[in-house]
């Protein structure tokens, strides 16, 4: 741009400071639009110790999806606080697609059992997809004289307070699902929390507790050996591995509870990145070897859209809030 001086000489005008600022902004925007995602390592936070289902899906599904997109993944196990430590870390991360969080039922139960979460489950995350679901099993110790849900309920009503049920801790899926069962059936049973899945299974096998509700994979061998007896599946559908086993609904108990595992990102993550991640994970879940491996572990691959996952999470949060309000269940 030129100006004319009083002497008539042509002079180069000094650019306004805001022009330089705009150039930097547009330059950064252009760079962001052209930068390939992912162009560096992606961190997947797992709010549990290594070895559980969240960890397995992070390492076996998400890592493979990121590799297919041309990058690498680091799985960051951050257990503690009933998953709040790892979840809060993810909520506060930059919404750039390079921090993801593996979630399960604890993610949707949290708002109902924890007085002050350091994040908002619904507002602080961008849902990407549900990776898998399964139907937990209601199992009893073989000494319990009940071979059906109907007989178990009759026994519990005849001997109030005698039967006990284990869980992986207060405020967990097993605890609240049984609280709902107690509420809708009117039975009186005593809750016994344990510090994880293995301890509660050991307690059932030894007869320390009468029954429990848990994901099927670690239970099937014990069911086959006779160390525990399966009475029902709690999900919407029967379990493929035990097709003869009715669901709780089919057995007359109006409770449907599926376990799920999914992946989310911090709120504000670009919709295009969310779409890229969803499509990559969905491709992995559709590959025959992935489906076979997941189904062998008694999970059902899903791969739903971000919008469908959003709807599911909203329903689950509302559902557990209702259960806790109706039953008065608390975290001890």
Image: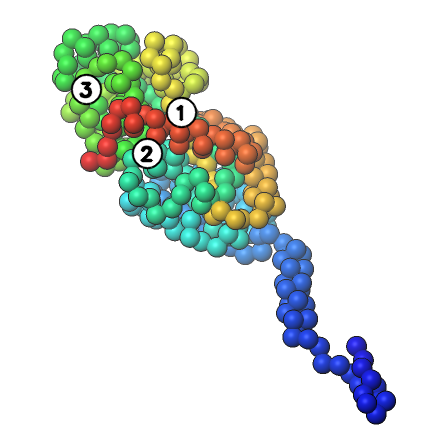
Counting other residues with Cα less than 10 Å from the Cα at mark 1, is it few (<14), some (14-19), or many (20 or more)? some
Residue 139 visible, this orientation? no
Question: Is the residue under label 2 in contact with that under label 1 (CB below 8 Å)?
Answer: no
Residue under the point 50% across and 39% down: 127
The residue singled out by tag 2 in the image is: 112
The residue that mark 1 highlights is 258
Quadrant placement of the N terminus: bottom right
- Look at the image and tell me whether residue 111 can be seen: yes
Q: So how many labels did they put on this image?
A: 3
Find the residue positioned furthest to the right. 8
Q: Secondary structure beneath disc 1? A: loop
Q: Nearer the viewer, residue 325 or 195?
A: 325
Residue at label 3? 189
Name which of mark 3 and mark 1 comes first in the sequence: 3
**Does residue 248 appear to the left or right of 165 in the view shown?**
right
Q: Nearer the viewer, residue 23 or 103?
A: 23
How far, Cα to Cα, is label 3 from label 1? 22 Å
Q: Are marks 3 and 1 in contact (CB under 8 Å)?
A: no
> For the point 33% across and 21% down, which residue is it?
137
- Residue 109: percent from the left, percent from the top? 35, 34
Task: Characterize the local packing of mark 2: few (<14), some (14-19) or many (20 or more) Cα atoms within 10 angstroms.
Answer: many
- Quarter-wise, where is residue 104 in the image? top left
User: Which residue does the image show at 45% across and 32% down from the upper left?
Assistant: 314
Q: Along the horizontal axis of the image, is 278 left or right of 331?
A: right
The location of residue 164, given as percent across then percent down, is: 18, 21
* Alpha carbons under labels 3 and 2: distance apart: 22 Å
Q: Residues within 10 Å of mark 3 (few under 14, many from 20)?
A: many
State the image coordinates of residue 61 (x, y, percent, origin top left): 49, 39
- Image quadrant holding the C terminus, namely top left
Are the residues at dot 3 and dot 2 in contact (C-beta closer than 8 Å)?
A: no
Whole-Å distance between the Cαs marked 1 and 2? 17 Å
Judged from the image, the secondary structure of the residue bearing numbered disc 2 is: helix
């Amino acid at each position: 741009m030129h100006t004319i001086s009083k002497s008539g000489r042509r002079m180069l005008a000094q650019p306004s400071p805001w022009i330089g600022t705009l150039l930097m902004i547009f330059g950064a925007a252009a760079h962001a639009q052209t930068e390939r995602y992912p162009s560096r390592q992606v961190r997947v936070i797992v709010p549990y110790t290594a070895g559980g289902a969240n960890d397995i899906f992070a390492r076996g599904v998400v890592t493979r999806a990121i590799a297919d997109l041309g990058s690498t993944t680091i799985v960051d196990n951050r257990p503690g606080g009933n998953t709040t430590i790892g979840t809060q870390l993810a909520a506060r991360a930059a919404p750039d697609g390079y921090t993801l969080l593996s979630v399960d039922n604890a993610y949707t139960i949290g708002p109902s059992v924890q007085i002050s979460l350091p994040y908002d489950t619904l507002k602080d995350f961008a849902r990407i997809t549900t990776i898998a679901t399964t139907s937990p099993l209601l199992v009893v110790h073989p000494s319990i004289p009940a071979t059906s849900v109907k007989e178990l309920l009759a026994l519990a009503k005849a001997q109030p307070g005698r039967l006990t049920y284990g869980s992986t801790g207060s405020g967990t899926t097993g605890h609240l699902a049984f609280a709902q069962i107690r509420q809708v059936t009117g039975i009186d049973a005593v809750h016994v929390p344990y510090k994880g899945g293995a301890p509660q299974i050991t307690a059932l096998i030894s007869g320390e507790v009468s029954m429990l509700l848990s994901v099927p994979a670690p239970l099937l061998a014990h069911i086959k050996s006779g160390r525990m007896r399966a009475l029902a599946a709690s999900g919407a559908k029967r379990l493929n591995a035990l097709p003869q086993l009715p669901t709780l609904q089919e057995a007359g108990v109006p409770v449907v509870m599926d376990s799920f595992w999914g992946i989310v990102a911090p709120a504000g993550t670009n919709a295009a990145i969310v779409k890229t991640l969803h499509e990559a994970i969905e491709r992995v879940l559709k590959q025959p070897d992935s489906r076979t491996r997941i189904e062998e572990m008694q999970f059902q691959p899903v791969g739903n859209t971000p919008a469908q996952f959003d709807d599911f999470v909203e329903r689950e949060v509302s559902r557990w809030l209702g259960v806790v309000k109706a039953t008065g269940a608390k975290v001890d």
